[in-house]
Every structure is written in structure tokens, then in C-alpha cells.
Amino acid sequence: MRAVNKGTPEELLQETLPVIPTMDVVVFPHMIVPLLVLDERIINGINASMNGSKKVLLLAARKKVEEENEAIGTKDLYDLGTISSIMRVIKVPEGGLKILVQGICKAQVEEIIANEEQLHVVANPLPLINYSVEESAPYLKKIKDLAEKISASNHLFNPDFHLILSKMNDPIKIADFILSHLNLGTQEAQELLETTTQEEFLEGIIAQLNKTIEVSETQERIRNRARDSMNKAQKEFYLREQLKAIKQELGEDDAEEIDSMRLKIAELNLDDEVLQEINRQINRLEKTSPDSVEATVTRNYIETILALPWNIETKDNLNLEHASKILDEDHYGLKDVKERILDFISIRNLKDDGYAPILCFSGPPGIGKTSLGESIARALGRKHFRISLGGVKDESEIRGHRRTYVGSMPGRIIQGVRKAGSKNPIIIIDELDKIGADFRGDPSAAMLEVLDPQQNKTFYDNYLGVPFDISKAIFIATANNIDAISEPLRDRMEVIQLAGYTSEEKLNIAKQHLVKRSLKETGLENKGIELSDEVLTALIDNYTQEPGVRNLERLIKKLCSKAARALVEKKESLLFLPETLDKHLGPKRLIDLEKGEGNQVGITNGLAWTPFGGEMLKIEAILIPGKGKVILTGQLGDVMKESATAALSYARAHAAEFNINQDRFTEYDLHIHVPAGGTPKDGPSGGMALLSSILSVLTNRPINATYAMTGEINLRGKVMPIGGVREKILAAKRNNIETVILPIQNKNDLVNQEEVTLGINVLWVENADEVLDKVLMPQIA
Ligand SMILES: Nc1ncnc2c1ncn2[C@@H]1O[C@H](COP(=O)(O)OP(=O)(O)O)[C@@H](O)[C@H]1O
Ligand SMILES: [Mg+2]
């Protein structure tokens, strides 16, 4: 960028020239600089100038303009610039011009003339500074000394820099050379441009060189400080030290954050083991660059530790009257369960850390298992949280991830404890029977540890890496199907079986709890909205078919939101009637089509128990021409298949009593099918229903469809007891059955549960004969 000294103005006459504003660069006389011009007005000026003197005035812009093509306001331009000649113009295909200009002399702007088309100035050229070699000699020596110092200590200038400089003598050349190497900011450069004497100019250059040296010395200091404490083997460590030094230089230390962490720890009163670990982590954080991934991981860890309730406990309210009141407030009925809960609280009264069993509520969905857990927390005045184990396959969900990556977290237990904010919360372990297992470990093993009072004093979460005491927590588990829980886990718990509700119970639950709650949630309290008993009964009987009340609650909420909308939109109170419910809820869920089908040959109403409540199943049998084979379909399990075979044998043995021709057994195949949703079915309790269907097809006598039955039979025709009586009766009631047939040995199951059999007849039987007498109807002609 060395300029040829030409074009010195012989006469310093005022001139009118087009202006080229420059950004980030100040052009000095002699300098040759390429520029890119995009602005239309400036291009016009250049074109005009190319047709005449080829001269323009370069003016530096004060501040950087964000958008390159944004026009610079005239007020942003310095008023002293450099008259330059345009050496070359190249059109850029994308638009704009690339030009090469060379500075001639400085000029003071007298007036800026800006119009739509062009930007001109009236400028007064200034004389070039006269350099005297003699007078500038001491300055030049100083400049050379400084430049040498810089190039010796620093990599800013290339190695040949001072070699070239030492050979130069012409002050102008030296000044140009230095100028082109110093990385000056616009303002600094402009200040140099505005100097009027050689002393001023050279002193300015010296000042800039000194500044450069200061910067490079600071850098050197930082590097040295880091180097002093450097361990040869640890490059990483070196970099961190360097960063620390830089931060000290900038005054940005994270010392404050770390100090406040230490203060908090002192307040937490931690065990030695925990204390040691967290101090180790804080020391580590101190040495880590605060913006590094590692620091983030460490900081999250420390925050988690600090946020845990190591020594925070809530005080229990063990007043039994109070507890009883809360339990009644939250749940209708459930007398036995509530009694059991009060027993549980009494034990705590006597011995607050004494053995308290883990309660497990088991039963179909929507019967209040989870909400009972919450209610107990409310009664005791404890914090609570719920972890749902449905589909949890990975042990680390419970026990946490190791702190090896940014997203690692504690497991759900520790997360819950952190949120609850006390170390003695009630932990509701929901759907314990749905826990899974896969290659990532067996979460039920982790649950075993959680629920073991011997081990959970020092519960170990992989993320924490130190033990946390969860032995003060109360665990309450829920499950649909207690049999699906592994035996060791089941042994830890006291199982409380809850059953589905009768329609009457549901009505009361709705009246006393669900409606109130829904009105409150929709802001309809005291707004005169009512759901009559008839409406609620219609919801229960026609729109839901469930052992619990979850759908019922959903429908009530739906009606409430309809009422809310009518109130807001039309200012009217909706009146709900059983006949008009379909307007709001769509057609009834259950049309009584089962009843309509009437009595048929080979079809018996069986009753089954499932984890989701009782269910009525049609057991179908037909004869097809064949050779006496038995075909079973409908995903029947082995036990059920055996019951079918046993029932068939019984029928064969008693063929004469029922007037069955023996060829029915040899010239036909018997096909037994149990429909309903492809769900697997198993168990012996279908024996009686299977026998009824089989005898029905063999004798061609229809089965009375107002009956439903359950019961195992042995080969001698004795009816044996079965499980899930209450659920099965409720299912029969939901299906509008008139009489339910049950094994007499199950009679005790219904002691104190008279409400269950309200509205249905029960036929207690001992022998298959008694059943067949009732259900097999006369042969159709
Ligand atoms: N006996 C009851 N009294 C009042 N509300 C009940 C009763 N049983 C269930 N509920 C309500 O029904 C809803 C579903 O209960 P939930 O506890 O979720 O059932 P589960 O956990 O057994 O599936 C909750 O809003 C709950 O309060
Ligand atoms: Mg639940």
C-alpha cells in the first residue's frame, strides 16, 4: 500500500467534489485503497467525476453502519477528509462499483450539498505536511525502537517488520509503513489525519505504538500468570488458568457465586459424606471455566444438592378426629378403608418412627386409590408427590442417571423429594403393577430397595452419588392387579382391596363430591346450576359403564362447562333433564341391545373379573358337522381350555339325563368361542357358563338371558368358589341382569355389603343341576 507521491496540489483552490463516505477506514494521502460502493447517489458522483477531474473527496463515517447498503447520513461524516483520485472502476455484477483510489491531499469540508441525485461537498484543500528529515529524526528513532520492541515480543507484526523498518529513512515512507501495520480504529486514525504538523503526526504514531505495546504486555502478563502455575501434563488445566487470569484482568470472577454456595452448605448441616462430596464438586467448579459444559453439569449438581431437604421435616397432625374429618370430606363411603387408615395413623401416634406398613390400594380404575393417597397426606399435613410407574422399564427412572452428561438427572424419587421440599413426604407409588423391565435393568429391584425400611435410610441415587434418607417418608402404593406385582414387593406391603361402586354409591359420590367439585372448578358455584338425581342416574346408567367414577366425573365436568358457556354466551341457566342429555353428550353409550337379543341356544352370560373391574362375557357354543373335535377360540388360556374339556366330559357323562343322542358327540365338532375384544381370558370360573352353553347346543334348548353366572365346576358337577364376587355382581347389574348365579361357598364374601345386591337377585348354588334347571329353557320346536 505504498503510494507514489504524485498529484500534489500546486494551487489550493476551493473545489466542489463528489463525496465517497468510507467505513472502518481512514484514507491518508499517498495511500491506495480499494472501496466497494453500493449507494446510488455515490455511484452517480463517481460517474460524474470519471467524466471530468477523476477526483473525489473521501470522508470517514463516524460510526459503523449496521447494514452495508444503508445510506450514511451526512451528519455521520467527519468534516476533514482526503481528496483522492480514482485509479480504476470495476462494475460488480451484483450491482455497485469496486473502485481503487489514491489519497492526494487532505481537505476541510466547507459545505455539504446533498440532493436526491448526488452528494457533493465544497472543500478547501490543505497543504501537505512538510517533513524535515532533521527535525523528525528523534521521533523516527523512537518509532523504530518501539516497533522493534513490538516485533520482538509479539506476533502482531510479521518477523520482517522491523528489518524493513530499519532500512527506511524517509519519514513519509516510515509513517505510511507504520500506519498500514497499526490496526487503528476509525476515530484514532481520524485523529491522526487531523494533525497539522509533523511533530503532532509523529507523536500520534508514537502514542499508538505505545498503546499497542501496552495491550500486548497485558496479554503477555496473562500468559505468564497462567504459565507460572502450569503443570506440564495438563494442557486443559493451563487453559483454565489462562481463562481465570483473563477473568481476573476483566474483573469477572465467579468467586461470588461459589462463596454463596459455601455459605448455603454451612447452613444445611450435612453429613460428613455428603459434605465431602459437595466440597469436592465446588472445588472442581472453581477450577472449571464457567461457560464450559462441565461447569454446567457440576453447577446443576450442586444446585440439586443445595435444594434437597436434607434436614427439613414437616410435623404430622396425628389428631384422629381431624384425620377422619378430612377423609370424609374427600371421599364418600369406603368405610373399611378409612378405618384402616385411621389405624395406621394411630400407630404413628404411639411411636412416630415405629414400623408402619406400606399400604397398597388395589382395585379397578377410578375408584379413588390415588386420591385416597392424597387425602391421607392432607389429613397428616404432609407434603406429597406421586410417581407413576406405568411403563417404567428403566431402572434409572427411579434411581437416576450417573452424572456423565449434560441432561443427566436424579431419579423420580429424589426429584419428587426435591419438589416436595421435605424429607418426610407421602410418596404415592402409582400403578406399581405396571412396572416393566428390560435390558436397562429391573426397576422393580430398585423399588424393592425404595420400599425396604432397612435400606431406604441410605437410599442411593446414581445422580446424587451420596445417600439420601427417605426412611421418614410414608409410601402408599396403588395397583389394579395385585397378582401382577412380584412376590417380594407384595410382601413389603399391606394390601387393601377396593372394589367398584354400585350405582347407588356412584350417585352419592356424584351428589356429595363430584358435582360440587366440578361446579367449583368451572366457577359455577351459587349460580343456580343443578344436576338432579335423575340426571346423575341417567349419566351413571346410560352413559358410563365402569366400576369407578372417572368417566362419570368427566361427564359431569362436561355438563358444567356447557352450563358455563350458556351462562356466558346467552346469560341463561341451562336446565338439564335426563331426556335431553343427548343434546349435550351425544347418544347414549349403552343401548340395551343385549337384552333385545333374548334367549338363544348356546349363548350364556358369563361373568369375569379383570384388573379393570368385572365384566360380562357371552360364552358361545355351536355344533358343526365333523368328528367330535373341540375347537376353542377367543384367546382362551390353558386353564379355561381345561374347564371346557371338563364341562364337555360332564355333558357326555350325563347325556342320557338330558336326552342327548350320542351321535351329537361323534358326528359334530363343538366350537366354543368367547368374544370381546381379543383380550386374553383365563381362569376356572367360567366352568359353569361353559357347561350351560355346551348343554344348550347339545339339547337345542335356549339359555335364559336374564341370568348371568360364575363358578368353577368339578367333574362331579359340584360348583366351586371363585374370586371377585363383588365386581362380578356389579358387572351383572350394569348389564341389566335380573339374577346372578354364584357358588354358595362365596356367600361370606358379601357380609356387610348388602348394598351390592340391591336391585338384583342372587341364586346361591351348590351343584350344576340347580343351575341347569334354571337356565335351560324348553326346547324350541
Ligand atoms: N368414594 C369417592 N368419593 C369421592 N370421590 C371419589 C371417590 N372415589 C373416587 N373419587 C374420585 O374419582 C376420581 C378418580 O379417582 P382416582 O383416585 O384417580 O382413581 P384410581 O386411582 O383408583 O384410578 C377422583 O377425582 C376421585 O376423587
Ligand atoms: Mg390412580
Image (cartoon, rainbow, N blue to C red):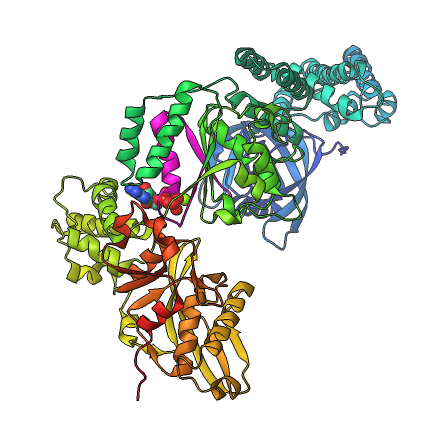
Magenta segment includes 516: no
Magenta segment includes 363: yes
- Residue at screen point 27% across, 68% down: 591
225 or 662: which is nearer to us? 662
132 or 448: which is nearer to us? 448
- Residue 8 falls left or right of residue 519: right
**Quadrant for the C terminus in the image:** bottom left
Task: Report whether residue 704 is seen.
Answer: yes
Q: Position of residue 762 (x, y in %)?
A: 29, 59
Q: Position of residue 288 (x, y in %)?
A: 68, 23
Magenta highlight range: 360-389
**Quadrant for the N terminus in the image:** top right
How many labels, in total? 0
- Residue 496 falls left or right of residue 456: left
128 or 732: which is nearer to us? 732
114 or 220: which is nearer to us? 220
- Residue at screen point 84% across, 23% down: 233
Name the image quarter holding residue 674: bottom left
- Residue at screen point 49% across, 79% down: 671
Q: Is residue 485 above or below residue 315?
A: below
